[in-house]
């Protein structure tokens, strides 16, 4: 629990410094059925919660955030706090095919 609090604090601090969208994230955000805006990403970072933690990710410690976008839709963001920025690895709209209701737990 404290680890999640420290991680979310670090994520929000790094996002205030700079957000870097990796190419995969840009492609996923721009898909016509998603159209996730940078303002929605910022909203999820500011108000969302960590639902999965990946401390051993090859890209560096990362995690999956869940929050609500501008129109109230659920958005998932995989991000990684770096020394002077927050890397957005991907962002997507979760589906009930892959996630249980509430979008906090994977279906399988």
Image (tube, grey):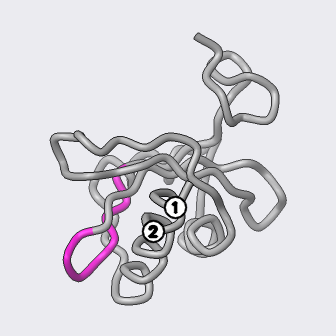
Q: Is residue 87 magenta?
A: yes
The structure residue drawn at horizontal position 23% and vertical position 82%, both measured from the top left corner, is 84
Q: Is residue 18 left or right of residue 50?
A: left
Q: Is residue 62 above or below residue 48?
A: above
Q: Which of the 4 quarters of the picture holds residue 97?
A: top right
- Please state if 38 lies on the left or on the right of 86 as rendered: right
Magenta residues span: 82-89
Relative horizontal placement of residue 60, taking residue 36 as reference (left or right): left
98, 63: nearer the viewer: 63
**Quick one: SS at disc 1?**
helix
Which percent across, then down, holds residue 102?
80, 35
Residue at the extreme top: 108
Q: Position of residue 58 (x, y in %)?
A: 16, 41
Q: Residue at x 27, y 54 (%)?
A: 23
Circle nearer the viewer, 1 or 2: 1
Q: Which mark is on residue 6?
A: 2
Marks 1/2 in contact by CB < 8 Å: the verdict is yes
Q: Quadrant of residue 39?
A: bottom right
Residue 90 picture location, percent across and down? 41, 48
Is 54 rendered above or below residue 45?
A: above
In this view, the residue in front, 60 or 97, is: 60
Identify the image quadrant of the N terminus.
Answer: bottom right
Q: Give the residue at x 62% y 46%.
A: 34
Question: Which residue occupies the foreground of this view, 77 or 14?
Answer: 14
Question: Residue at label 1?
Answer: 2
């Amino acid at each position: 629990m404290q680890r999640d609090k420290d991680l979310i604090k670090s994520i929000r601090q790094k996002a205030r410094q700079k957000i870097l969208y990796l190419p995969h994230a840009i492609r996923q955000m721009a898909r016509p059925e998603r159209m996730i805006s940078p303002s929605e990403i910022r909203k999820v970072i500011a108000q969302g919660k960590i639902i999965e933690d990946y401390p051993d990710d090859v890209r560096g410690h990362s995690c999956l955030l869940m929050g609500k976008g501008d129109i109230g839709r659920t958005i998932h963001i995989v991000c990684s706090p770096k020394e002077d920025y927050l890397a957005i690895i991907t962002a997507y709209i979760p589906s009930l095919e892959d996630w249980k209701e509430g979008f906090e737990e994977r279906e399988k």
